[in-house]
Image (cartoon, rainbow, N blue to C red):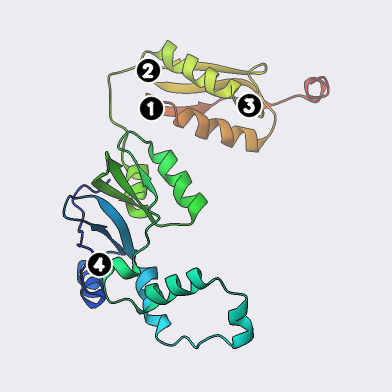
């Protein structure tokens, strides 16, 4: 996460928020009260909605009959409000410092959002954006001590058993100085690529060598 987060109080004028985002090159800013509690977040989408609201036409009388008055009032406030509190998105998607990068990525994909707040006991600790996730993806894993070849081998085999497409019967695994070697037979090129990625994800693996051969027809027919 990015721990140093730019924030604004709820009474900040919309124009000031827009200028802040433009000058800092950021796409969102959390809104905090005097106690440091997160009230919401103002995003680029909120500002665009506010700007577009100035051009909205009033709905016809027939359409207005079927619209919820509360929703109409909320939309009016969000598209005509003059402060951060009036246009912010209150339903904030948040995680804790203990959540994994994979969980954060899943939330972003599921909710269709570009960032999540990191909150502990109601207090803002940081923010994780898509850019933060990309940096985590390309950064080398932290070394917590060298793992033995046997432990790496067991971890690779355990990972293979979890995947229905991975064959531990005809594909043998050996590990030498952190390099995973596959021997035996492989069903398809797709499985070969999948096992390479699977092995590379195991902590401590320094490389992958594939010495397998295409599975013979007589073996393939029997499985």
Give the total number of marks visible in the rendering: 4
Residue assigned mark 4: 25
Q: Nearer the viewer, mark 1 or mark 4?
A: 4
Relative placement, left or right, of 214 versus 7 is right
Secondary structure under tag 4 reads loop
| Residue 141 placement: quadrant | top left
- Mark 2 vs 3, N-terminal side: 3
Secondary structure under tag 2 reads loop
Residue assigned mark 3: 166
Asked whether the beta carbons under mark 1 and mark 4 sit within 8 Å of each other, the answer is no
- Mark 1 vs 4, N-terminal side: 4
Other-residue count near label 2 (Cα within 10 Å), few / some / many at <14 / 14–19 / ≥20: some
Residue at 42% x, 29% y is 207
Q: Which mark is residue 177?
A: 2
Of 185 and 75, the residue lying toward us: 75
Residue assigned mark 1: 206
- Mark 3 vs 4, N-terminal side: 4
Distance (Cα) linking label 1 and label 2: 8 Å
Of 116 and 166, the residue lying toward us: 116
Residue at 55% x, 85% y is 59
């Amino acid at each position: 996460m990015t721990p140093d987060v730019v924030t604004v109080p709820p009474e900040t004028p919309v124009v000031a928020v827009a200028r802040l985002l433009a000058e800092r090159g950021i796409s969102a800013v959390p809104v905090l009260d005097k106690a440091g509690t997160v009230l919401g977040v103002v995003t680029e989408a909120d500002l665009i909605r506010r700007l577009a609201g100035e051009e909205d036409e009033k709905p016809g009388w027939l359409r207005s009959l079927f619209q919820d008055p509360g929703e109409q009032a909320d939309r009016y406030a969000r598209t005509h409000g003059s402060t951060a509190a009036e246009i912010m998105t209150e339903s904030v998607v948040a995680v804790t410092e203990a959540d994994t990068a994979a969980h954060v990525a899943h939330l972003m994909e599921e909710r269709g959002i570009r960032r999540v707040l990191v909150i502990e006991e109601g207090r803002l600790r940081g923010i994780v954006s898509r850019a933060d996730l990309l940096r985590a993806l390309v950064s080398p894993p932290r070394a917590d001590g060298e793992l033995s070849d046997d432990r790496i081998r067991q971890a690779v085999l355990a990972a293979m058993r979890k995947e229905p497409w991975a064959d531990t019967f005809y594909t043998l695994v050996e590990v030498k100085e952190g390099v995973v070697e596959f021997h035996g037979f492989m069903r398809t090129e797709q499985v070969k690529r999948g096992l390479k990625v699977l092995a590379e994800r195991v902590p401590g693996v320094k490389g992958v060598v594939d010495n397998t051969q295409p599975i013979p027809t007589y073996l393939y027919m029997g499985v």
